[in-house]
Amino acid sequence: MENKGGHAVRLHTCIHEFFGTAFLVLSINSTSINKFQAFAVSIMLLSQICYIGPTSGCHLNPAVTIGVLVCEFKQRRVENIIYAISFAISQICGAFFGTFLSFMVQKKDYETQTIFPGVASLCPAVADEAQDKDEKCSIKDMHVQVMLAELMGTFVLVFIILTVKYSWGSKDLQINAFVIGTALMSAIAMTANFSGGGLNPAVAIAQQSFQNIMEANFPGNNNRYMALDAMAVYILAPLGAGAIAGFLQLYLGNVRNQMQLAEDEVPKSRSGENNEPLVQTRKSGDDDKYTKQPEPFKNI
């Protein structure tokens, strides 16, 4: 949507979003037993931005797509809505494909009903404290806390991405990728102890479905069944955060434009002294001289 010419190669950009999201999910599951999972996932996003950023914008997240849609809504509305829907579908399908790749590379032991190294478990950390391992991963009475954690973490991530895209981004793609990658790592670290750090509706839908299937077929790994209430929070909270970040970025963009217009309309002084412009005034016997005289105040 934000890249020039993207509408002309929509299928190409959707394919990029599909595989980009797939490899992102693959990195999540491949590092499930690694203490540096957040770092590994952030590096994966950084590399994906460098590769597919110039074509699709490298959203890889419906929350980011919602934010971009809000910022681009004044232009080509119908086409952008269709574009956003196609992006979201590509991201969700790519996330499911990523879980399939994760399953294919796992070592399966059908006698003990275990897989190695195992899959990531997207479950609120507060739920681990509130219930036994034999129960579903349900938020129970912690809906507000988990939703706020997902809302704040996703808002920070999406707002930084939109700021890089529309406001203060560098001309060097690699620097922008580094900023967004570190933003993702910070958002995961900020929310991991509360909600588990989902921050992505496409990943939430695919990953929660995947861990439920793995628990049903490989119970030896003791994966958590995901209850419907937790799934709803992981989907709705990031989407809401993406929309809020988009509206805030749109508002701040309008403010910046007004400030720029105000600067352009301020009259420039010929003398440079006290910023007072020189205007020609008629004086008896001295018609060709200029004297300093401030212009009347104008509302800008």
Image: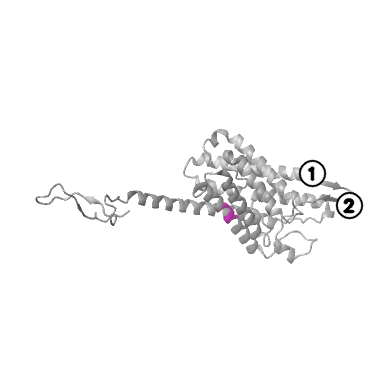
Picture disc at residue 295 = none
Residue 6 placed where, x, y %?
A: 55, 37
Q: Which residue is mark 2?
A: 112
Q: Calculate the distance from the C-alpha at mark 2 to the C-alpha at mark 1.
A: 18 Å
Q: Is residue 29 left or right of residue 112?
A: left
- First in sequence: mark 2 vs mark 1: 1
Most foreground residue, 108 or 33: 33
Residue 267 falls within the magenta-colored stretch: no
Q: Nearer the viewer, mark 2 or mark 1?
A: 1
Label 2: state its secondary structure.
loop
Residue 206 placed where, x, y %?
A: 70, 48
Inspect the image, locate mark 2, and give the three-letter code of the amino acid beneath it: Thr
Residue sitting at 59 percent across and 52 percent down?
A: 239
Label 1: state its secondary structure.
loop
Disc 2 crowd rating (10 Å Cα; few below 14, some 14-19, many 20+) is: few
Q: Is residue 120 left or right of residue 67?
A: right
Identify the magenta region. Answer: 154-158
Inspect the image, locate mark 1, and give the three-letter code of the amino acid beneath it: Val
